[in-house]
Image: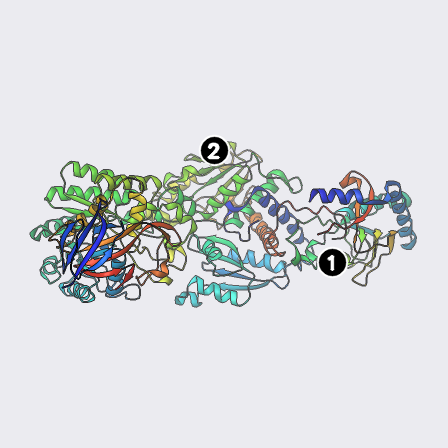
Amino acid sequence: MDKQQDAQASDARPVLEGPDIARVLTRIAHEIVERAKGADDVVLLGIPTRGVFLAQRLAAKLEQITERKVPCGSLDITMYRDDLRMHPPRALARTEIPGDGIDGKLVVLVDDVLFSGRTIRAALDALNDIGRPRAVQLAVLVDRGHRELPIRADYVGKNLPTSLRETVKVQLAEEDGRDTVLLGAKADQ
Amino acid sequence: MSKILIRGAKVLGGEPQDVLIDGETIAEVGSGLTAEGAEIVEADGKVLLPGLVDLHTHLREPGREDSETVLTGTRAAASGGYTAVFAMANTFPVADTAGVVEQVWRLGKEHGYCDVQPIGAVTVGLEGKKLAELGAMHDSAAGVTVFSDDGKCVHDAVIMRRALEYVKAFDGVVAQHAQEPRLTEGAQMNEGVVSAELGLGGWPAVAEESIIARDVLLADHVGSRVHICHLSTAGSVEIVRWAKSRGIRVTAEVTPHHLLLTDELVRTYNPVYKVNPPLRTERDVMALREALADGTIDIVATDHAPHPHEDKDCEWAAAAMGMVGLETALSVVQETMVETGLLDWAGVADRMSFKPAQIGQATGHGRPVSAGEPANLVLVDAAYRGRVDPAGFASRSRNTPYEGRELPGRVTHTWLRGKATLVDGKLT
Amino acid sequence: MQRHLISAADLTRDDAVLILDTAEEMARVADRPIKKLPTLRGRTVVNLFFEDSTRTRISFEAAEKRLSADVINFSAKGSSVSKGESLKDTAQTLEAMGVDAVVIRHGASGAPYRLANSGWIDAAVINAGDGTHQHPTQALLDAFTMRRRLVGRDAGLGQDLAGKRITIVGDVLHSRVARSNVDLLHTLGAEVTLVAPPTLLPVGIETWPCEISYDLDSTLPKCDAVMMLRVQRERMNAAFFPTEREYSRRYGLDGDRMAKLPEHAIVMHPGPMVRGMEITAEVADSDRCTAVEQVANGVSIRMAVLYLLLGGNEPAVTHTRPTGSEEK
């Protein structure tokens, strides 16, 4: 098992390195400011685990651009997943909604990889139980395609055409010690 | 009458011998015996014992025929190698009158699988308040000599004293179910480490021991003999040992399950382990084995207590107390006493046939295997090992704690006064 | 985790910490405008109560409803149970209705164990208190309360109660709360002392992983939490103690005794309280008494247990933290 994973890791090739990730996040931040006309009412909500770190990095960049503090929190979608019954229950992650809430705000959901779209559907359900935003947008580091639901991202770091036989692995310094996006072959089950 | 020649049987575990049965009696014991027209039973080195005698059986009839009847109970007895059983008095109605004991006695005679000797209640309705007509029961056709309120303790010291004194007139014996009632209110299992953890009401050893201590002193004081039912604790052993050393006329029995099982089993909350007195600790089990070996405990008695399935297929507190035992008793004794080297087969014959017959005055039972004695015999395949399968029980009930457990020994033949009641493990 | 929750002793340290951490997240749902999660949608949970306990039943019911489970309440009173139907028949009837979990409260010790292990039913069994045996969700909510108060809400995440000194006072003999707490607190690394008159401690207690004392005053100055157990007045009649007054004088918690506690120490009570017996009104109503908080925490703990037992295709495996980053 471990060996397999090692093999997988060694087979994987980086498609984004640290500086690339920093650059695309800066671009996304500028896009948000532009599309949200100054980002006055933007609230960033990262989807655990890595979406939260991306949201925090975006918040820092937005602050540099707008010279205002941008509310940033986390939204755990575990209990809204549609595949709960297919696995043992997972440990829950933190949902942290910034003090002023999300009612009437422009919520930008932030995640690392956009794939089937099911996570985002769960996130929309979760948001629904928390409040009523003015609008909801989606920012992702990588869009690898293969959508199973009518969902698209508003801000994409990199469009990465993949086959279903491939895996996309995002590593971030906060969790993994380094910034990189790896594309590899799926380990045989 | 027909003749039966048993060839090559280890009589009481000794050297193989031949035993010739003629009619109801043993005609000859020796080697190289022949007999014209006799049915031959090849014992092939199996152990031949005198028919076993159980001083403590619940046959449930009258009243609880859903759990056992005299017929099914005596068939179970024959299966287990018994030729005589003493039927406890806690039936519905209670065996506290000549009428009830005679009914049970007659049923046993009619069925013919095993002699049934009824035990009479000590007090009316087992209520511990008023002496039952002990004399009338003794004088009845059933000829009752053993009296017991088993299931309940004769806890009132005065009633117990009177009963002990009264039965002296016809050499009867009171068999005491030693359980101090106040100390065992709400009792569900042995009081100790396991009960503390499981949160089940405790049945302390002292509740048994205090009654035994009182009763041996009473027996001494009034010059009577007393029998202690299902002794279960190391402390009780010490008291009986002390009493015997003082010359007090006390006898005691132990059940097979108290020789083998401990209260650790209750951790499963499976009511098949619920019994009264409760399963005790490993230390008690070892003390009981030792006491049976050295004669402090005189006999093994089954306390065969059949219960219908629904009374055990429930939560612990709601379940009935008791286990069936007639069909597994000898195997458990072989496992715990013979295979451990504590008793030889002659010792088993003593504890399961001679002594119980003596205590209960069961005429014709518990006799030596020798010429001129009644042909009450049992043949045991001691080399056999097998798992207990309650589906094969002759008893109407299946509440055995040994289901699936591997035990040694198997009774293959039982003869009641020369008539085979069990042949090759099958009831006749 | 095991498939059922029968005894606090069945939980490993990691199981217990996972439950406490999960409950901490569940607690946050209570602060939201919509206090409901879709997690157990389509799952049916029956609350099978053979013993009256409105508090525990309501707590479970609230937890089940917040997780969107379909809830059936079954109280033995006035039902077929009082007409002699057995636990087995009742359970099988419920199973036939497609129940996914049975939350059972029963007066007989071991009834939930029996229900879970007799092959009568397939549903998960959660013990909501059996006889004088166990009450594992109570122990969990007590531990949750202690961790929040003594370690901290966020600081406590992932932590156990190592080194915390907990004193439990009162009728240990008849208390499933005491048994469950001793088991769980020991698993979580706390040091437990039981204080009671000798009559209210079970024979055989010497193997329990805790200290025993007959003297409340000497233990108070060195404990982080003191938990007062309910003492029923009827016990007096069975000679467990002479009078109510003598009991409360020796083992009750009043203002003077509370003053002997270290400043940070909390006073806990599983409820319902017998004021004037084991606890005075002054103590019960003080800021240090967490009785009301324990009730609120009970809902979070029960949500956590229900989620971890029923939320997936099998019970939660401890130590499963999502490690992949790919959309899962």
Where residue B376 appears, x then y in whole percent? 18, 55
- Within 10 Å of disc 1 (Cα), the crowding (few <14, some 14-19, many 20+) is some
- The residue tagged with tag 2: helix, strand or loop? helix
Q: Numbered disc 2: what chain?
A: C
Residue at 8 percent across and 60 percent down: it is B139
Reading the image, the residue beneath label 2 is C219
What is the quadrant of residue A130 in the picture? bottom right
Q: Numbered disc 1: what chain?
A: A
Tag 1: amino acid:
Ala
Where residue A17 appears, x then y in whole percent? 86, 42
- The residue tagged with tag 1: helix, strand or loop? helix
Question: Would residue A106 be found to the left or right of residue C46 on screen?
Answer: right
Residue at 50 percent across and 53 percent down: it is C127
CA–CA distance in space, label 2 to label 1 = 51 Å
Inspect this view and state whether residue A110 appears.
no
Q: Are marks 2 and 1 on the same chain?
A: no
Where residue A43 appears, x then y in whole percent? 81, 51
Inspect this view and state whether residue C183 appears.
yes
Reading the image, the residue beneath label 1 is A122
